[in-house]
Amino acid sequence: MPEAEGRRPAAAPEIPARAPSPLQPRAPSPFVPVARLEAFARALFVAAGMDDGKAATVARLLVLTDAMGRRTHGLAMAPLYLADIEKGRASGGAEVGMAVRGEPDVLKDSGLTAVWDGRYLPGLWLVATAIEQAIPRAAAHGMAAVAIRRSHHIGCLAALAKQAADRGFIALIANSDPAGQRVAPYGGTEALFTPNPFALGYPGETHPVLVDICASITTTSMTRQKHAAGERFEHPWLLDGEGRPTRDPAVLEHRQPRGSLQLMGGTEYGHKGFGLALMIEALSQGLSGHGRKQAPRRWGGNVYLQVLDPGFFAGREAFLEQTEHLGERCRANRPIDPKRPVRLPGDQAAACIERAAREGIDYDAPTRTALNEWAARLGVDSPLS
Amino acid sequence: MPEAEGRRPAAAPEIPARAPSPLQPRAPSPFVPVARLEAFARALFVAAGMDDGKAATVARLLVLTDAMGRRTHGLAMAPLYLADIEKGRASGGAEVGMAVRGEPDVLKDSGLTAVWDGRYLPGLWLVATAIEQAIPRAAAHGMAAVAIRRSHHIGCLAALAKQAADRGFIALIANSDPAGQRVAPYGGTEALFTPNPFALGYPGETHPVLVDICASITTTSMTRQKHAAGERFEHPWLLDGEGRPTRDPAVLEHRQPRGSLQLMGGTEYGHKGFGLALMIEALSQGLSGHGRKQAPRRWGGNVYLQVLDPGFFAGREAFLEQTEHLGERCRANRPIDPKRPVRLPGDQAAACIERAAREGIDYDAPTRTALNEWAARLGVDSPLS
């Protein structure tokens, strides 16, 4: 929407905050305070039947994800989650949809390592809970890990890793969905993997470093967005069904044979992305003992989570001494483009979170419409005009 | 050398083994049995002053690396190691060169996590020793980790990870050298990181999967090879001193301002390689508490090593069930090029190892010459004609 209409620019990461001008009258702000958004999302999930504690955690993390600027994985996911909850209810107990009540089954627990069956409970809540359980174990022994099978979608890995990094721990999270096939192995034509995200969060003096990458160049949600908008990618980040590089997102949706997302490294050095994809499948499906072998068809995810305490290695101060020094040298590195200084992953998220706390968060029209439809249906007051 | 002269092709990964023809007379084979090569390399290191146990381990792993087909990091490294040992001796106790005697200093040991000062002892021996110590700990508790500062060069990470994977464990190894600057942060022009390799080895029914990738597209040794041969890269895998992509390996060697190796993802999505580089620096230098902050100038490396026991998660059988299923689906994936079926990382290494055990290993002329010069100097019999 044009700025002439008095709306502030969207909180997209690329656009810096503008100071409000006292001379220019402003239309009512579409920015909504973070606490109000959290309460809204929580009420939606509770109205859909989710336990309140789970709803509070999922709501908090989705809004945090938006605050970090990762809009594809924030409240824009809520309508998809709500639809999947409804799908589960409508099935009359069949094995579909997001589960909303109860606890994961603990299949194994050695004190340092554990395996959970997530029963397709909300992934953000499952992983946040696993982190809460792993942190005291890591604080007592130096490291701890949880492998989760049959989680539901876990959203933004960086938002989850932040929970541990904010408290001085290192968190490593690997995630795959054995029900999804979007990425072919290197040299192959048939989609087999999901994009397989992988995050490492570690503490910093002012805010954590949050590495969050995946084994493919682009993601399923980016490809769907491009396809819906009738756009092509700027670079050939997909393969058609014969394995030829293409910029056309439609190859993933319609064409026969179906195409795939290119591995990180593409045709030149996609063996690197392939290695990362295998690593993430082995950790998340191999260690949890459930995955593509069982060929699940339900939207979900497998997770490997590991927490490390730097205090059990050379110490927290020694850790920060190295990582802060490195961070400073990155930020001071002479940039290729003088207008684009080098930033660390997590820098932008920290700035966006501060801004969201100050100004609230606004949403694009499709997200507002979808959330408002669910609000009306579930009888929840929406703060999104 | 042309095949008409009766020599078998080099054991390079791309070239399949040829069955010897009984009708064609063969010149004496330059292929040397693995055991003879190990004894030769061990004798070289012992003659240079290295403890025999260390020399045996380093020799075994360098020859294994050649057997796996990773020629840049096999016996071709031995002359560099021997020169660095000599540099240390010639310095009269100054802080330079590879150390050859004694043990690492154990700075911390909690039972599951440990920090070692490697004292610039041979990296292959240090990491192999750390793996030997971590395996029983992982077998008792599920996981164990060692962070090593001031190791010497650790060679081929896949050869090391294989030691654990062959015995049913998962090994993760991350490595950086704080004395080296070859890779700039994403968006920057000044080299700051090393290529920062990262390996994950996990067990398989017949042979392990060995993922071994690094945060940059290409490596220092590949770039030096290209430069020495007067060749350019096929793709622009480097940046010049202004951050412009280039195929010219000379930018790393001579030009002012000096260039750098491109991060995995290059200009399009190098933030992914940047994330991986930061992750590896944090694990290897942050957890060991020594690194770029101290600005060491001695050839070396920092290591983070972690061993996991799948038996402490869903179990070894459940792990193999998932990973073997995935491996089969990769290998059966319809290839882009029918002549190039999909292979898993580790497949080629396993085939090369079998072939080396059967036929021995041959070496190119520059490697033979360099090894023979050291053999003559140290009074060791060389099997390399």
Image (tube, coloured by chain):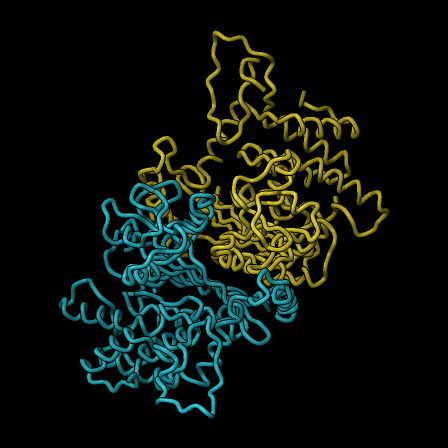
Chain colours: A cyan, B yellow
Image x and y of residue B276, in percent: 52, 57
Image x and y of residue B77, in percent: 66, 37
Residue at 58% x, 62% y: name it.
Answer: B282
Which picture quadrant has residue A231? bottom left
Residue A122 vertical position relative to residue B69 in the rendered view, above or below: below
Q: Nearer the viewer, residue B220 or B140?
A: B220
Would residue B85 appear left or right of A95 to someone viewing this image?
Answer: right
Q: Nearer the viewer, residue A275 or B166?
A: A275
Image x and y of residue B86, in percent: 79, 40
Tally the numbered discs: 0
Residue at 20% x, 81% y: name it.
Answer: A378
Residue A290 vertical position relative to residue A70 in the rendered view, above or below: above
Would residue A368 appear left or right of A35 to someone viewing this image?
Answer: left
Residue B330 vertical position relative to residue B41 in the rendered view, above or below: below
Which picture quadrant has residue A150? bottom left
Q: Nearer the viewer, residue B145 or A299?
A: A299
User: Looking at this rendering, what residue extends furthest in the right direction?
Assistant: B92
Residue at 53% x, 68% y: name it.
Answer: A209
Residue A34 vertical position relative to residue B264 in the rendered view, above or below: below
Would residue A264 appear left or right of B378 to someone viewing this image?
Answer: left
Image x and y of residue B122, in percent: 68, 45
Q: Note whether residue B112 is visible.
A: no
Q: Nearer the viewer, residue B320 or A73?
A: A73
Which corner quadrant holds the N terminus of chain A?
bottom left
Q: Note whether residue B12 is visible.
A: yes
Which corner quadrant holds the C terminus of chain A?
bottom left
